[in-house]
Image (tube, helix red, strand yellow):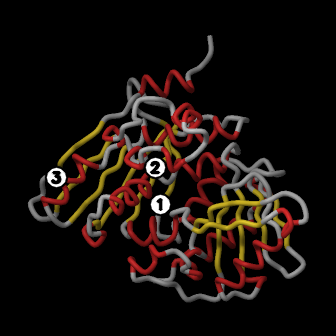
Amino acid sequence: MSVNALSERLVARLVESAARLSVDISRTADGTVIADAGVAAPGGVEAGLLIARICMGGLGRVARRMSGDADPLWPTLIEVHTSNPVLACLGSQYAGWSLSATKEQTGGKKFFSLGSGPARALAAKEPLFGELGYRDRHDSGALVMEVDRLPPQVVIDKVVRDCGLAPERLTIAVTPTHSVAGTVQVVARVVEVALHKTHVLGVDLHEIVEGSGTAPLPPPAPDGIQAMGRTNDAILYGGRVHLTVKHDEVARRLAAELPSSNARDYGRPFADIFTSFNYDFYQIDPALFAPAEVWVSSLESGATWHGGRVDGALLQAQWGSKP
């Protein structure tokens, strides 16, 4: 399957419906399409949902729904499902392509972003693609950048070159974390975070056959650190994931080891943790990057194992309404 071919119609919808979605579309001198969903343009929830589906390579369903619980964790949830979890989440959605430029290259301010989305699979620059045994071949591609300014030409040129595309066949969507669309597309990574943690645990990815999840959609924060904190907290303390795997042993292990509560740094708002480590992600216990609560069902026996818990009190303390 080609994740870029499968997401092509979604990319076309983003461009064609830009005005309705509050997205600004521009083109570079060479014709590369830039979809601004939160830098100068307002963006919005619908734009974020569509960009999240693009990010999953057209292999995922992403929707917003209101909580129906009598005592809801949070009123608005993002719901995700995929029947191709490894390819959708790790082969496409995962933000693993490091893209940077010096201030000399940009003629001003240095640039850094982690690229996510199906175009990653065209370039296949990350060792992960060797482990997955996958590389896409298609004549168009889409990349998502979670950054607060549009990419400089030197970075666009690198993406075009590494993907082997004609410039006009590349679309880059930009979704700052503090924007509404950016908040949506990050929270929509709840299943991807579970898949990445599964990979970190050394579990054979061929075991995973289905993935579903929900996470609360927080209000965006104008401060970048707080916005990053809210989107991470949504998954680490409010994310719920249901995986289906092939064997009982794997289901039992994932239920026990996957939840974020296994981490040394669990229990504090992510923004506080990040600040306490001097803004260095690599000092944070990697076990923290996981959903709060998991159910893992096994095809071998039909049994389901459960682990972890949501922490509604922490989320309400961070996001709750003011009197």
Residue 75 against residue 19 in the figure, above or below: above
Q: Within 10 angstroms of label 3, few (less than 14), some, or many (20 or more) residues?
A: some
Residue 252's tag is 3
Q: Secondary structure at mark 1?
A: strand
From mark 3 to mark 1, how far is it between C-alphas? Answer: 27 Å
Residue 199 against residue 48 in the figure, above or below: below
Residue 79's tag is 2
Mark 3 vs 1, N-terminal side: 1
Q: Amino acid at mark 1?
A: Arg
Front-most of residues 269 and 178: 269
**251 sits to left or right of 195:** left
Q: Secondary structure at mark 2?
A: strand
Residue 26's tag is none
Q: Quadrant of residue 139?
A: bottom right
Q: Position of residue 57 (x, y in %)?
A: 53, 71
Question: Hey, which residue is sitting farthest left in the picture?
Answer: 301
Q: Please give the residue where the numbered disc 1 appears in the rendered image.
A: 61
Labels 3, 2: front one? 3
Q: Amino acid at mark 2?
A: Glu
